[in-house]
Amino acid sequence: MDEATARQHMERAIAEMWRSPNTARIGVVLARGDKVLASAHKGQDLNHHAEVIALKLAGAAGVDLRGSTAFVTLEPCANLENARIPCAQLLVDAGVTEVWIGRFDNNPRIYRRGWKLLRDHGVSLRDFPADLRAICEDGNSTFSGHFYKRIGERGTAKFDFQQNGGRYQLVLTDSPDSPAWETRWSTCGATSMYANGGRRGVVSHARYAEKFSEIDDPDALDWENHSPRIDIGEIAIFRNEYGYALCQLKSVDPPENHGGTGHTSMKFDYELRLR
């Protein structure tokens, strides 16, 4: 397939993406040469992902998808811990031999796993060009933002600490000038993380504290360590000009060299306190 034809299919997949009513907007086009075999978007059928809908539409029309190409605005899912057959596997089973991807899924349970599953089954993989990738990113800024940022005085965050430089932002309100804290994390072990301040005075370890309510004045703690080790259940505190972000580590999915299963993530509860 020539580049001009491929771009037309990518643009059609993006048009499908914008038809999706969901915050996770996804468009899919199945094609052979310049012919569109099926197209779909997330939300068209609330019970299925966009790839499944497109495959069902092609099947209902009696279309043979062997040797076809898929254009997807978001990496097909490959969550092998889920009981359903992932979309990446369904594309393989349908005989799709080439997949163009608009953006990778920031969900730590999926990121690059869909790409890997397709690659391991001999599927040719291409990326949308940069200008079209930017549109795919823009269409999913709210969805993808959950894996980089949370808004609210308190809540729970889960993200892949091996993406985005291990950074996760906590924002007090949704106003443009809201106080915000950038937390930074890196691998320590199977049940612990390093809370990284980059320099002294930014991060502290509330040693032995089991609840946020047990921490009276965070400034009373030791702030000399720039990267304390935080075990599951322990509390790290990040400090800036606005105040404090108290973060209690709840779980860790470690990298493979620490006994992990192939994807990495961490979860923590947080509470924001103004000075």
Image (cartoon, rainbow, N blue to C red):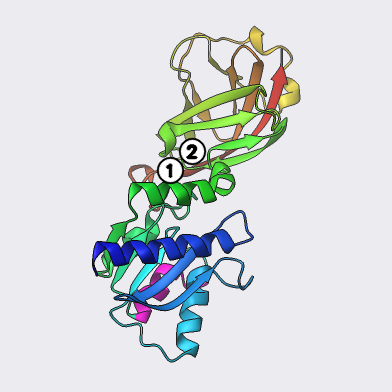
Judge by depth and name the residue closer to the eye, 93 or 124: 124
Height in image: 108 above or below 168?
A: below
Q: Magenta region: which residues?
A: 84-94
C-alpha gap between disc 2 and disc 1: 8 Å
Mark 1 residue element: loop
Q: Residue flagged by tag 1: what amino acid is it?
A: Pro
Quadrant of residue 68 in the image? Answer: bottom left
* Disc 2 element: loop
Disc 1 designates what residue? 254
Nearest the viewer among 156 and 88 is: 88
Residue that appears at 53% across and 51% down: 139
Three-letter amino acid code of the residue under disc 2: Thr
> Alpha-carbon neighbours of circle 1 within 10 Å: few (<14), some, or many (≥20)?
many
Residue picked out by circle 2: 191
Q: Position of residue 135 (x, y in %)?
A: 46, 49
Name the spot of residue 1 as percent of width and height, x first: 24, 70
Whichever of labels 2 and 1 marks the residue nearer the N terminus, that label is 2
Percent from the top left, x then y, of residue 182?
54, 25
Tell me: 86 left or right of 219: left
Nearer the camera: disc 2 or disc 1 = 1
State the quadrant of the C terminus: top right
Could you tell me residue 65's position as x and y percent? 35, 82
Residue 77 in view of the camera: no
